[in-house]
Image (cartoon, rainbow, N blue to C red):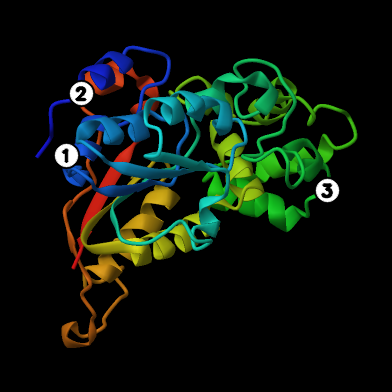
Amino acid sequence: MPLALPEFAAASMSAGHQPVLLREVLGFLSPIPGGRYLDCTFGGGGHSRAILEAAPDIELVALDRDPGSLARSEALAGDYPGRFTLRVQNFANLNADPGTGFDGVLFDFGLSSFQIDDPERGFSFRNDGPADMRMDPRTGVPASLWLETATEEMLVGAVRDLGEEPHWRRVVRALIEARGTGSLSRTVSLAAVISDVIPARDRYTSRLHPATRTFQGIRLALNNELGAISVALLAAFEVLRPSGVLCAISFHSLEDRTVKQLFRLWCGQPTSSDDSTPQDLRTRSAEPLTRRPVIPSDEEIEANPRSRSAKLRALRKL
C-alpha cells in the first residue's frame, strides 16, 4: 500500500515543516494522472505538494482558515500554475462551492508547526506570547478575553470535556480566581496558573506538561473545532466521486472518535457499543480502508515528535 515518497517530499521530512503520515496518506489516496484532490487543512502545504507531485496534471484545491496560509501557498501556486488553488476559509464552510467529483479528500486536524512555533499566535506555552489561540485571528475573541468572560459551565466544557483534564475542578477554580490579575493574558503566566494547581505527583510523573490538556481544551472550545469537523466530514463525503478516497488524520481522542463514528456509519457498521440497529436497516455507502487507525512509525516519531499522537483513518466511497 505505501508508496515511495517523491524526492522533494523525502527531503522535506528533515526540514522544519514535516507533514504527518505522508507516505501512508499517499498510499491510500494513490493519486492518479489528471485527478482532482481536496486538501481541507493546507497548513504548511506538505501534503498538498506531495499530492501534486505524485502524478502528472493533478489539480488540487486547498483550504485553510488561517490567513497566514496565503503567504505559505505562494511557492505552490508558482510551481503548479493553473493546478493549485488555495481558499482562505474554515473547512466547516466546505459546502461553499469548492467543486465536486474529487478523487480524494484529506483532513489533517490540529495545528500546523507554523502556528505552534509563532509565539504571537498563543497556541504554545514554550515561548511567551499573547494568549490568543484563534485559528483565524480576524474573527472571534482571543483566549485571554474568553477566559475572563466565559461562564463556569463553559470553562468546565473546555477543561473537563474537551481537554479531558482529570483535575478539572482545580483548574476551573484557578482560572476563575485569576480573573482580573492579568495572568490569563499571556501564555506563560496562563500555563503557570494551571500548573500550580496540578498535584505534584502528576506534575513530575507525566510526560505531558501539566497545562497541555487545558490549553488543548481551550483551543478546541474557542475555535469550535469538533463541531467544524463533523460538518466538514459530511460535506467532504458529498464532494467525493464514487471510488474516491477520504483520509482524516486526528491528534485528539475526541477528534478521532468523531471520525471513527462517521466512517463506521458510512461503512454500514455499528457506530458505538450502544448501536443496535439491525444490519438490514443500515446503509452502506463506503468501504473502510483502515480497520484500525494507522499510527506513525517509530522512525517518524523520532524524526518528528509532534506526530506522536496522530491517527489516520481512510475509506473509499462506493
Look at 81% across and 27% down and name the residue there. 183
Up/down of 156 relative to 267, above or below: above
On the image, the x and y values in percent for residue 177 come to 83, 38
Look at 23% across and 57% down and name the residue there. 244
Name the residue carrying label 1.
27
Residue at the limit of the structure toward the right, as seen here: 180
Q: On the picture, is 23 further left or further right than 106?
A: left
Quarter of the image with the C terminus in it: bottom left
* Residue nearer the viewer, 146 or 209: 146
* Residue nearer the viewer, 120 or 88: 88
Q: CA distance from mark 1 to mark 2?
A: 12 Å
Amino acid residing under circle 3: Thr
- Lower position in the chain sequence, tag 1 or tag 3: 1
Number of the label disc, if any, that sits on residue 6: 2
* Residue nearer the viewer, 191 or 265: 265
**Residue 311, quarter of the rendered image:** top left
* Residue nearer the viewer, 57 or 145: 57
Q: Which structural element holds mark 3?
A: helix
Up/down of 52 relative to 102, above or below: above
Amino acid residing under circle 2: Pro
